[in-house]
């Protein structure tokens, strides 16, 4: 912990423990951690994400008690056992299945928050990289979890995603065989995915611990991006942010509950209620919503290897961001040009997400005839994905040049001037 | 490195023989590295297909069950296989495209057995990412893959979309006029 410890053991037992395992001191220091006083609600998603991880682990361990990871048993153990026979099984699965989506809602807002306020910049690069690692692990975990109910979408999703790795030269095929344990996705695949799906959340928990550690060394960034300069810039994490995070978690739980109780299948696909059939691919296969933008990038490119590399590169861009953006101003509050390109980027990601859910030759504007550009009509989902994907990557090039040439607005000299003296902000910085 | 070695050898106060100590370091590190590899390999190789999975036998199939213009999908080594009884038009279409612009050039004749052009036996895995294409879709009267829109012609050759290769023709032989053995 980078701030000096203020913990004073009060009782004899605490003193005894403090000189042997200072765990109470450790917790007390986390609670008293000096936190910028101007954090807004976008900063509550860290707490919300921790909540999501605990929910997934608790419900997951319970599901694992009733789940049978075999090709013949998996579908029945979920759809009949857990959904119909196990007491409250429907509830626990509803929480776990929708919980994965909630987890991704939170992680996306958390990441966008980080980009907007420049939280990836020095000295928080390691913090940012660990966050990207968590995100990749989450995608792997959610993907393998989705395979477990062994429905049609589970099976074909597993097939397509494992085959993605097969596109890599030389190592691709052997790795795919290692994942499958056979000639195709089959029982051995399901078994090992279950084992890994159980393991990875605990790996995530460990990386989260590192992430929080890396947060507590430089401390939080804040909406102004201006560094904390004195004690008056901060308040103790508890009670100020425990209460703020708690309130946000409560609101989040309400939204979560609406899905679990009123729309339990809204985010799922009906095809997954059909048992896996290795001989028939569903007419329209799509991944879960949180993977759609990447899926659209993959489909946009007519070459298998380049498509797979672009998909990997789209996530790789996030890892590289701290070294792409050279601007010394962190927060986009003071970077109107960057902000504009960033908002367009969010729109491009949304377009990609929508395209990912549509048929590749589906029309954008129904009824409008259009000409063929290379292989698809210009009025097609494929071309919208191509333009959006181009912007997705182009954004990072733009950000690089903006960092060099953009003229930012004056930055306030302290993080609370915009709150206490709004008029002072408009004045140029000294 | 070499410098510091000679230095300490010539230094009488430092009487330990450095080359012997180096040897112990290198030997210990090498033994540990060897040990790690020796343990890692079984842990990785266990993921490869087990003997019972590999033992999946060949498959015999009676073609007389498939009427003209019909297609069946059967399972061979847990992989879907198409058996298509092609109509003369499908064969003619495929042959007409033999020298057209093909992404993965191959003649139709090379994909079927001579004298048995009506039987097209294909691994029903899209060479893009492995979905099972559906017959009758796409611009080439062959297969359309529902996953990312790859289009195959009536010879199972890739014509459009992200797939790089033609649908694979598995090893098979005619045992009699109407019976084949795959694998
Ligand atoms: C990062 C945390 C986790 C995420 C994002 C996650 C995600 C998922 C997803 C998306 C599904 C498919 C839900 C469905 O459609 O039914 C699933 C299923 C499952 N998960 Fe998890 N999971 C997590 C943690 C865990 C843990 C820690 C365990 C066990 C210890 C677990 C055990 C299971 C089991 C047994 C199933 C199959 C039953 C079912 O489909 O409902 N999960 N998980
Ligand atoms: S799997 Fe067939 S087009 Fe992608």
Image: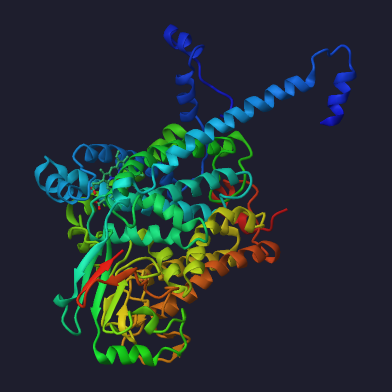
Towards the viewer: B91 or A351: B91
Residue nearer the viewer, A302 or B69? B69
The picture places residue A424, in percent across and down from the top left corner, at 62, 54
**Residue A225 in the image: x percent, y percent?**
59, 50
**On the rendered image, what quadrant is the N terminus of chain A found in?**
top right
Q: Residue at x 37, y 69 (%)?
A: A356
Quarter of the image where one finds residue A367: bottom left
**The quarter of the displayed image where residue A5 is located:** top right
The answer to whether any part of residue A361 appears in the image is no
Residue B97: name its quadrant. bottom left
Between B19 and A252, the residue placed more toward the observer is B19
Q: In this view, does A50 lie above or below A107?
A: above
Name the residue rendered at 44%, 79% in the picture. A383
Identify the residue shown where x is 46% and y is 78%: B104
Does residue A383 appear to the left or right of B16 in the view shown?
A: left
Spot the residue most to the left: A85
As drawn, is A145 to the left or to the right of A375? left
Left-right relation of A300 to A254: right
Residue B131 pos. (x, y %): 32, 67
| Quadrant position of ligand 2 | bottom left
């Amino acid at each position: 912990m980078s701030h000096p410890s203020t913990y004073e053991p009060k009782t004899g037992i605490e003193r005894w423990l403090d000189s042997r395992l200072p765990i109470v001191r450790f917790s007390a220091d986390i609670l008293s951690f000096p936190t910028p006083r101007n954090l807004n609600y976008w900063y509550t998603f860290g707490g919300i994400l921790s909540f999501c991880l605990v929910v997934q682990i608790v419900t997951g361990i319970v599901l694992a008690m009733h789940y049978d990871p075999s090709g013949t048993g998996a579908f029945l153990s979920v759809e009949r056992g857990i959904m119909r026979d196990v007491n409250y099984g429907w509830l626990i699965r509803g929480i776990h299945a929708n919980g994965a989506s909630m987890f991704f809602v939170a992680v996306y807002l958390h990441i966008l928050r980080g980009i907007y306020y420049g939280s990836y910049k020095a000295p928080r690069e390691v913090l940012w990289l660990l966050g990207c690692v968590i995100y990749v692990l989450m995608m792997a975990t959610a993907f393998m979890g989705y395979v477990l109910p062994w429905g049609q979408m589970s099976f074909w999703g597993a097939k397509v995603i494992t085959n993605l790795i097969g596109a890599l030269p030389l190592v691709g095929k052997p790795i795919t065989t290692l994942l499958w344990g056979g000639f195709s996705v089959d029982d051995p695949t399901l078994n090992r995915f279950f084992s890994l799906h159980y393991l990875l959340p605990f790996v995530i928990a460990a990386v989260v611990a590192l992430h929080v550690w890396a947060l507590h060394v430089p401390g939080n960034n804040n909406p102004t991006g201006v560094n904390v300069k004195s004690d008056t810039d901060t308040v103790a994490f508890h009670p100020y942010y425990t209460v703020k995070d708690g309130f946000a978690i409560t609101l989040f739980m309400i939204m979560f509950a609406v899905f679990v109780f009123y729309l339990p299948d809204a985010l799922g696909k009906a095809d997954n209620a059909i048992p896996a059939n290795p001989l028939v691919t569903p007419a329209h296969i799509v991944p879960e919503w949180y993977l759609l933008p990447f899926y659209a990038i993959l489909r946009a490119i007519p070459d298998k290897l380049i498509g797979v590399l672009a998909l990997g590169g789209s996530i790789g861009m996030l890892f590289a961001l701290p070294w792409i953006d050279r601007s010394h101003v962190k927060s986009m509050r003071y970077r109107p040009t960057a902000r504009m390109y960033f908002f367009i980027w969010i729109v491009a990601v949304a377009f990609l997400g929508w395209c990912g859910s549509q048929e590749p030759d589906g029309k954008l504007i129904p009824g409008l005839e259009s000409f063929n550009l290379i292989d698809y009509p210009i009025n097609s989902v494929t071309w919208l994905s191509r333009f959006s994907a181009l912007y997705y990557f182009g954004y990072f090039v733009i950000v690089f040049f903006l960092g060099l040439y953009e003229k930012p607005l004056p930055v306030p000299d302290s993080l609370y001037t915009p709150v206490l003296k709004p008029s002072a902000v408009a004045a140029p910085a000294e | 490195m070499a410098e510091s070695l000679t230095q300490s050898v010539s230094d009488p106060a430092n009487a330990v023989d450095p080359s012997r100590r180096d040897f112990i370091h290198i030997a210990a590190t090498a033994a540990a590295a060897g040990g790690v590899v020796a343990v890692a390999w079984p842990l990785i190789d266990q993921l490869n297909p087990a003997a019972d999975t590999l033992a999946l036998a060949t498959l015999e199939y009676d073609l007389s069950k498939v009427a003209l213009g019909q297609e069946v999908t059967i399972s061979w080594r847990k992989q879907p296989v198409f058996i298509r009884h092609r109509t003369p038009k499908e064969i003619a279409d495929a042959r007409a495209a033999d020298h057209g612009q093909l992404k993965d050039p191959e003649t139709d004749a090379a994909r079927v057995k001579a004298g048995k052009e009506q039987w097209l036996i294909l691994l029903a895995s899209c060479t893009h990412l492995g979905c099972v294409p559906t017959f009758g879709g796409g611009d080439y009267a062959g297969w359309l893959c529902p996953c990312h829109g790859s289009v195959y012609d009536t010879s199972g050759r890739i014509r459009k979309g992200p797939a790089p290769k033609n649908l694979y023709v598995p090893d098979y032989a005619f045992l009699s006029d109407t019976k084949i053995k795959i694998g």
